[in-house]
Image (cartoon, rainbow, N blue to C red):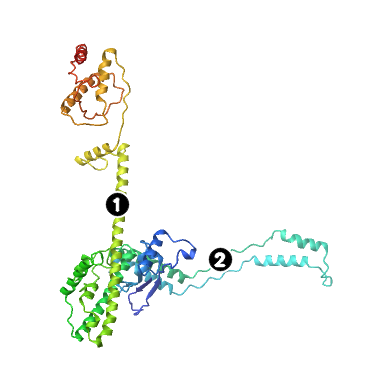
């Protein structure tokens, strides 16, 4: 990708030079480092190879960086106050230049001007005053190590040999190491790097978000839409040439009604072929289907098509119906039109399949997010960490949410065995037997009587709250179905227990047992 900046002309520079920087995309980011392709990029490349979709770079399958791969160049024009984006398929987009973007571009121009400024002269390093004594001491050491006479240079005394061996171990007295100066950096290169960084940041902040709003979410639908527009442009050119040949041969030109009737006959004769859809039938009315961001490069950028390639092919006469002098050229145009119609049909099928898969993926992602949110909400309510008022939920909705969450949580309370006196044991056993929930429910006409018995049992049970204060409370038992026949295992409902007369109530139970016996 090429980034181009056109500065404003000034009196000093009436024709300022164009500022150019490149932002390349790695061609082989994985294979160059001997790394395997990720599964999503591998699947994208296989789809492009199977459907004959042009994919020059494997990184185009990445949704986060594919737009940079399809941008050919970006031109920032300060005189025109516009941003022009050219894509690799030949399409162009024009964006306005905001005030903040202008400030960033002026900073880029300033950094470029500083890079052409003359560099300052380097400072000369002063000589150190201690260099003289150190050189003198070194020359003195050399004079000591050398023999006094020149004739016996090959023969050295033992003391000279010993001194030559141990002299490197002695510390250098006045010899000091000079501080090294840092390497000189080129200021022009620094300014150019700063200018490039500012221009790249301007592209990422002001151009890339606008392109993401105008273009699809992935490379595959953009490539399908781009190829469809190119194929339709070629079809319109061939259509004009075919109509000119038919006019020269004095053959009737096809009309829209003929094309629509031919397409409907073809669809009726071949029901198994799904290539003809309602969208293709609506194309012959002079307008395309509504342009959506998922299927178009730019909103409103495609021109309306007059007809569909397949319907036009079905409405024109065959080659042998024309005079001999027009048959060769007409046949070549027919073969090109057939190839265009077949290609458009295949890529439209691919686009429909991609949209269905993308919609299914988004639906599953939304469903999974909803499940995780509900699970977290239920966990927070069950742990007592969240209430309806904490979330800003009030009124009927908060009550309904609490009830729904309470139903979703299953709580089992185990009632411990109760201890009673001998006079109360029969009543407690009968009460626990009647209040036990049944596993199966059956319809009965005595359900109202069972409800009355439950109410009476609850009233009798309230008298023993003092002794049962430490025991957990049972959940409300479901409605019990009363059997049709009474027996000792299934006794009839007991009369209401009078307060303070437990002996008389116990005698009534004994009387009922005697009557049943």
Q: Calculate the distance from the C-alpha at mark 1 to the C-alpha at mark 2.
A: 62 Å
Give residue 317's position: percent from left, percent from top: 21, 79
Q: Residue furthest bottom?
A: 325
**Front label number (1 vs 2):** 1
Comparing 464 with 434, the one in front is 434
Quick check: 91 left or right of 192?
A: left
- Residue 181 got which mark? 2
The quarter holding residue 28 reads: bottom left
Local secondary structure at mark 1? helix
Residue 286 vertical placement versus 461 (above, below): below
Give residue 150's position: percent from left, percent from top: 82, 72
Give residue 138's position: percent from left, percent from top: 71, 66
Local secondary structure at mark 2? loop
Characterize the local packing of mark 1: few (<14), some (14-19) or many (20 or more) Cα atoms within 10 angstroms.
few
Identify the residue at image location x=20%, y=65%.
Answer: 278
Identify the residue at image location x=62%, y=66%.
Answer: 128
Quick check: 14 left or right of 316?
A: right
């Amino acid at each position: 990708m090429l980034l181009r900046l056109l500065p404003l002309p000034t009196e000093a520079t009436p024709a300022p030079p164009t500022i150019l920087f490149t932002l390349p995309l790695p061609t082989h980011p994985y294979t160059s480092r001997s790394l395997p392709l990720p599964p999503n990029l591998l699947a994208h490349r296989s789809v492009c190879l199977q459907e004959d979709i042009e994919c020059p770079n494997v990184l185009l399958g990445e949704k986060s960086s594919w737009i940079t791969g399809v941008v050919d160049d970006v031109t920032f024009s300060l005189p025109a106050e516009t941003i022009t984006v050219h894509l690799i398929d030949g399409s162009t987009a024009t964006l306005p230049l905001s005030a903040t973007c202008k400030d960033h571009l002026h900073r880029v121009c300033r950094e470029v001007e500083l890079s052409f400024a003359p560099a300052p002269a380097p400072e000369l390093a002063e000589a150190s005053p201690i260099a003289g004594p150190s050189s003198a001491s070194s020359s003195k050491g050399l004079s000591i190590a050398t023999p006094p006479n020149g004739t016996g240079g090959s023969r050295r005394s033992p003391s000279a040999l010993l001194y030559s061996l141990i002299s490197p171990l002695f510390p250098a007295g006045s010899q000091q190491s000079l501080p090294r100066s840092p390497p000189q950096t080129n200021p022009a290169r620094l300014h150019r790097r700063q200018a490039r960084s500012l221009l790249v940041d301007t592209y990422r902040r002001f151009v890339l978000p606008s392109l993401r709003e105008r273009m699809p979410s992935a490379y595959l639908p953009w490539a399908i839409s781009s190829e469809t527009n190119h194929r339709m442009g070629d079809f319109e050119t061939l259509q004009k040439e075919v109509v000119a040949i038919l006019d020269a041969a004095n053959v009737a030109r096809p009309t829209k009604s003929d094309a629509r009737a031919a397409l409907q006959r073809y669809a009726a004769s071949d029901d198994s072929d799904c290539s003809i859809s309602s969208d293709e039938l609506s194309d012959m009315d002079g307008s395309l289907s509504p342009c959506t961001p998922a299927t178009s490069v730019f909103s409103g950028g495609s021109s309306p098509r007059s007809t569909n390639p397949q319907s036009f092919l079905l409405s024109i006469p065959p080659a042998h119906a024309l005079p001999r002098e027009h048959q060769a050229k007409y046949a070549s145009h027919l073969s090109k039109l057939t190839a265009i119609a077949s290609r458009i049909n295949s890529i439209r099928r691919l686009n429909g399949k991609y949209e269905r898969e993308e919609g299914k993926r988004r639906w599953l992602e939304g469903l999974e997010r909803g499940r995780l949110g509900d699970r977290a909400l239920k966990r927070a309510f069950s742990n007592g960490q969240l209430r309806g008022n904490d979330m800003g939920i009030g009124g009927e909705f908060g009550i309904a949410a609490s009830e729904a969450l309470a139903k979703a949580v299953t709580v089992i309370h185990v009632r411990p065995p109760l201890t009673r006196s001998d006079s109360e044991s029969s009543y407690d056993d009968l009460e626990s037997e009647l209040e036990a929930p049944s596993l199966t429910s059956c319809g009965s006409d005595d359900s109202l009587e069972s409800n009355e018995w439950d109410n009476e049992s609850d009233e009798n049970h309230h008298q023993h709250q003092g002794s049962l204060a430490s025991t957990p409370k049972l959940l409300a038992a479901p409605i019990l179905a009363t059997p049709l026949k009474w027996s000792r295992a299934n006794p009839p409902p007991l009369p209401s227990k009078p307060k303070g007369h437990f002996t008389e109530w116990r005698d009534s139970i004994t009387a009922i047992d005697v009557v049943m016996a």
